[in-house]
Amino acid sequence: MDLLADVSNPQNFEPQSQISHLALDIGGSLIKLVYFWRNNDRGRDDDEQRSHNESVGVSDSDTGQPVLEGRLHFAKFETSKINDFLEFIHCKKLCLGGFRDCTAPSSDKIFIKATGGGAYKFADLFKEKLGITLDKEDEMDCLVTGANFLLKVDGDGKFERVSGTNLGGGTFWGLGRLLTKDENFDGLLELSHQGNNRVVDMLVGDIYGGTGYGKIGLSATTIASSFGKVISDDKELEDYKPEDISRSLLRMISNNIGQISYLNALRFGLKRIFFAGFFIQGHAYTMDTISVAVHFWSKGEAKAMFLRHEGFLGALGAFMSYENQSLDGLMVHKILQRFPISASSAGNKISCSLNSDPNGNESIECTVRGT
Amino acid sequence: MDLLADVSNPQNFEPQSQISHLALDIGGSLIKLVYFWRNNDRGRDDDEQRSHNESVGVSDSDTGQPVLEGRLHFAKFETSKINDFLEFIHCKKLCLGGFRDCTAPSSDKIFIKATGGGAYKFADLFKEKLGITLDKEDEMDCLVTGANFLLKVDGDGKFERVSGTNLGGGTFWGLGRLLTKDENFDGLLELSHQGNNRVVDMLVGDIYGGTGYGKIGLSATTIASSFGKVISDDKELEDYKPEDISRSLLRMISNNIGQISYLNALRFGLKRIFFAGFFIQGHAYTMDTISVAVHFWSKGEAKAMFLRHEGFLGALGAFMSYENQSLDGLMVHKILQRFPISASSAGNKISCSLNSDPNGNESIECTVRGT
């Protein structure tokens, strides 16, 4: 699978001068990219382009502030292929999406906003191979800034990390790869669509014999033990359908995330829980399972909420941090979505269409205002 | 592995008349048995046995109450081999450890106290094959009664089930079996001793490059994603050592249990959390991981506590429910441990020797007092 389809495809990827505000979130599994693509017709010559730029609004009619209109683009890349990624940035001159610090002694240094652990781990590599300095932003700060941006909230920047889990998308992917031989995250999700977790999961009904354990609210179909049925089957790994295993894994991880999230929400009296991160990526069954888990454990008191572009919160936050940088001669002080993206509660049935192209890439219209 | 070594070995298993109070906890994976074995020298003839019975105390010298002294024995069997188990009960006349309801119209009916889902699921099977009626006791009631007995607490019988998880021993066993081809729970635990989870787990240091993410208290060795390192390895399942996989699984499940338990304890302001169930079975590394998880998430505020015979709480509770039954002509009203078994807090380093024989079977001395 091509993880960066719309940028890596030469037909989709044209004048670098239209790209700005490149921001990276380099996690353990994936590199998430966000960049701004100024509105412009492709293939125009420089004069036409300049005149078009003016027509799409170099200044706001009300405030007189300079304005850039365009789209925010989201893309992802596997972190394990970091060298390919560096090569790609080099070939495509993506570093033009960074900025030069004009106040620094050597003003030809290019800075790119970056967050996530990889911003630290790979800092030397970026410098050595591309001469790029990663301007590091704190991961949690970026996550909150990104969420606030998507929610159109002017947060006060105060937040607290209250918990976490080591059972997330990486676990789903890692275990899924070992158990099904499918190497791709998206492939595993695809498999899970066609699977039946009851083949491997031990349900309350398997233990109690169809009646469930109603006294404590456990129906016969409640999962008592993920993968618990495997114990007593006289089968090898090869005898199970990858679809069933993937489905069970997805439910195991989603259930657990829902439960841990709810237990944490309870500590702070919160009724709405927003879920983000690449594990979800708009996948209806994942959102459904998380929603059901939150509903189950909270006895209907709490609700799971989902954001679009949920895998890009960190990269978006790094993107927002360009607001304090001089870019294209503008001090960017406001990046606005042109169309609000509302959070949606999935409930038990989800019908959700993401604002994404057929390659799985996503974009939103937005405006950059200068001072 | 022989799961019921000390009973199934004919050398260990002699006159059935010494057995009473057989109680079962039939779970999804394991059948747990508890029974009382009256003190007696083996191989005596009936007269000698009777006289010995009298000498070990038919009445208490202070109260004049009838007293039986002996040992409680604990054993386990795989639930999937239920038919072997029934055959075994039949051959060994273990049903003599049940009771006859003298007040019932047909006084030859044998009752055995049983709890767990299998007490419902397999009730007809016990009746049909052995003519035994399972006298069902509620699973949660038994768990609490068993815990109170081991803690020497006279509980008021009030309790609330506040949470649960579908990631427990069954998941460890099921996933472990699929990933390592080791079919036995104990074999998987054994493997985990020699493993290194860092081979498959993605640590914070793998993402941040050795420095960790100290700002939010995550050291470089904290597990960021269980099995997350597998994603970027160019390896097949066969290329990993079963030891490393088993170790990672054990930490994944134990960590999660510790975290969910702590989050629940927090709701009720509890500082001590008692862990039970067959997943633990006195395994030092499991207890250590759970303890570390509780310590980590509670920032040292809460403590993990462990009971001996922790896998038998349900069976013990079913055993205790014989207190209301006439047995051997006695109305048993008190079953006392002769040696208190204190709960132990594992802390970060555990050196713990269980009261078990080399076959992994366990027993405790106890006294049954009649009215």
Image (spheres, coloured by chain):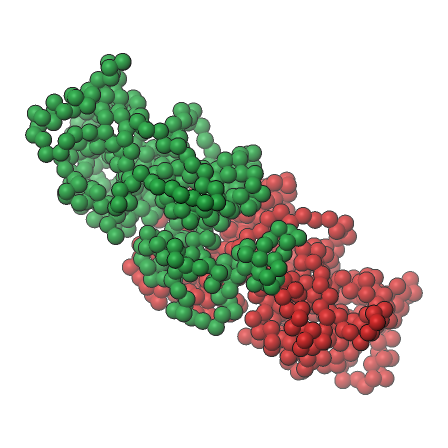
Chain colours: A green, B red
At a point 57% along the width and 48% down the height, the residue shown is B261
* Residue A272, above or below B241: above
- Rendered residue at 56%/38% (across/down): A301
- Using residue B53 as the reference point, say whether residue A190 is left or right of it: left
Residue B40, position in %: x, y? 79, 77
**Quadrant of the rendered image containing residue B121:** bottom right
Do we see residue B364 in this rendering? no
The residue located at (59%, 61%) in the rendering is: A210
Q: Is residue B298 above or below residue A194?
A: above
Q: Nearer the viewer, residue A174 or A232?
A: A232
**Splitting the image into 4 quarters, where does residue B359 fall?**
bottom right
Task: Please provide percent x and percent y for residue A297.
Answer: 56, 45
Q: Position of residue B124 (x, y in %)?
A: 66, 71
Between residues B153 and A293, which one lies in front from this camera angle?
A: A293
Residue B328, image quadrant? bottom right
The residue at the point 54 percent across, 75 percent down is B1
Say above or below: A141 vs B323: above
Q: Quadrant of the C terminus of chain A?
A: top left
Horizontal side of A282 relative to B260 (left or right) equals: left
Indicate the position of residue B161 as horizontal and vertical percent values: 64, 49
Q: In the displayed image of the protein, which residue is found farthest to the bottom?
A: B45
Q: Is residue A306 above or below residue A103?
A: below
- Does any portion of residue B340 appear in the rendered image? yes
For the image, the number of numbered tags is: 0
Left or right: residue A96 versus residue A158 is left
